[in-house]
Image (cartoon, rainbow, N blue to C red):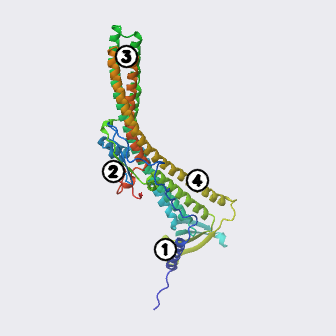
Amino acid sequence: MTSPAPEPGARLRRHGRRIALGLAAAALCGCAVGPDFKAPDAPKAERYTAAPMPERTASADIAGGDAQKFVNGADIPAQWWALFHSDRLDALVAQALKANPTVEAAQAALRQAHESRLAEQGSLFPSLDGSASGTRQKVNGASFGQPGTSFMYSLFNTSVNVSYALDVFGGVRRQVEAQAALEEYQRFQLEATYLSLSANVVTAAIQQASLRAQIAATQDIIEADRKELEVVKHQFELGGVSRADVLAQQTQLAQEQATLPPLRKQLDQNRNLLAVLAGQLPGDPLDAQFELIELRLPQEIPVSVPSHLVEQRPDVRAQTALLHQASAEVGVATANMLPKLSITGQLGGTSGQIEHLLDAGNGIWSVGAGISQPLFQGGALLHQRRAAVAAYDEAAAQYRGTVLTAFQNVADSLRALDTDADALQSQLQAKQAAAASLELAGRQFEAGAVSYLSLLSAQRAYHQTRIALVQAQAARYADTVALFQSLGGGWWNRNGAGDAAGGTQMRGAAGP
């Protein structure tokens, strides 16, 4: 007994699967036109600065005056701000990384880029659409040579439509590649946001500590000037000084008092800045009271080798991703100039009764293939490809500029660490000398050995050196922050999947 012949729909499904598998294999084996991207090589630099850096910086016997040793080839910890050994600072940075809107925006941009890449990957697969319809019609019999009669009937249709554009020349794959590069760009934009935000918080905390120290020093100076004014007045009553000397001391006191309001204004603005960086309103309570004496200056400074800098800097990695995206777009523009092949298929059924829609004998099917080749579009495709090549050249130039800026940032930070350490040492010596000079001038003035102008000159010199010393202290801390930021901030040392505040790394952000 012979087996029944397979239904037409079954044969179609069997042949359709074979055709689809064959076409998919052909598409996957096809070439991808356009350049295959390769990241530029790292600059062959042996050091960051023109002249070799010393092994360690100068030191000064004051807070922030420790000598710092440059450890070449050492790695930067992920939470580099912890090297300042301030629990309050650690907590503020963690709060900022969790609550600042710029982080949320960068995270959302990364999610958007990720979903856009997945959506673009859908173009690599066939599209499948289902449809169904039902109609009730009345037809006049005159159309069939039977005037005076009419027919009424129902018609139901259902079908599955398949279409597939074969990616023979890799245009779709290049589009997916370009979208993946944009996702990589957003990933490193997020890392750059983490780094910039944490550096801004630490720098603002150091600035606040500096302002507090400057205010305290100014208040001490004002109190000393006030006491000196009483002495000058007493000398005037005894006839030892002139009225002009009294007025000069009053002027000196008023000038010092006038420097307090601007410092307090900067301190208030700094507090507002810290609140906003932490994701709060300026009026919200914020535990952010920093003093220079509470911060410890890191004594060992890790300096990564120059060849690793392009892999560590988030901005360089982001620019590399843009260069990759521009390279893929050249392939897309090239593929648009070449033929496009597609196949289509339909499988369904039609019947006058819905319950018999899928019965044997009511099936319908069709299979088709097509090819299209741009013949004349006014040179649009050619110029679009040339524009894509020019965009790649632009991205390559921007990449080189970003790399140069990265090396400049590191060189500037290293030199600042060295020279500002020397400046702090000299400034401490200047302050000590000015203090000794002021003490001597005060004793000589009380004894009548020197004029009041000599005392006033010594007072001004001491006041200037004391404020300058506080600023030089803060510069040492700020230089250290700038170096950590210029070296990339250690994001590659985070483990697992999470955010920067928790000391973890986002999935897929491969480190050096």
Identify the residue at image location x=42%, y=47%.
53
Measured in 3D between alpha carbons, the distance from the residue under mark 4 to the one under mark 2, in whole angstroms, is 37 Å
Q: Residues within 10 Å of mark 3 (few under 14, many from 20)?
A: some
Measured in 3D between alpha carbons, the distance from the residue under mark 1 to the one under mark 2, in whole angstroms, is 59 Å
Residue picked out by circle 3: 450
Q: Earlier in the sequence, mark 4 or mark 3?
A: 4
Q: Quadrant of residue 232?
A: top left
Residue 373 lies, with reference to residue 297, above or below; the image says below
Q: Residues within 10 Å of mark 4 (few under 14, many from 20)?
A: few
Q: Residues within 10 Å of mark 2 (few under 14, many from 20)?
A: some
Q: Earlier in the sequence, mark 4 or mark 1?
A: 1
Furthest-front residue in view?
449
Q: Quadrant of residue 385?
A: bottom right
In the displayed structure image, the side of residue 338 where residue 219 appears, left or right? left
Secondary structure type for disc 1:
loop
Q: Nearest the camera: 463 or 258? A: 463
In the displayed structure image, the side of residue 68 where residue 176 appears, left or right? right
Circle on res. 394: 4
Secondary structure type for disc 2:
loop
Residue picked out by circle 1: 358
Q: Position of residue 158 (x, y in %)?
A: 51, 69
Secondary structure type for disc 3:
loop
Residue picked out by circle 2: 502
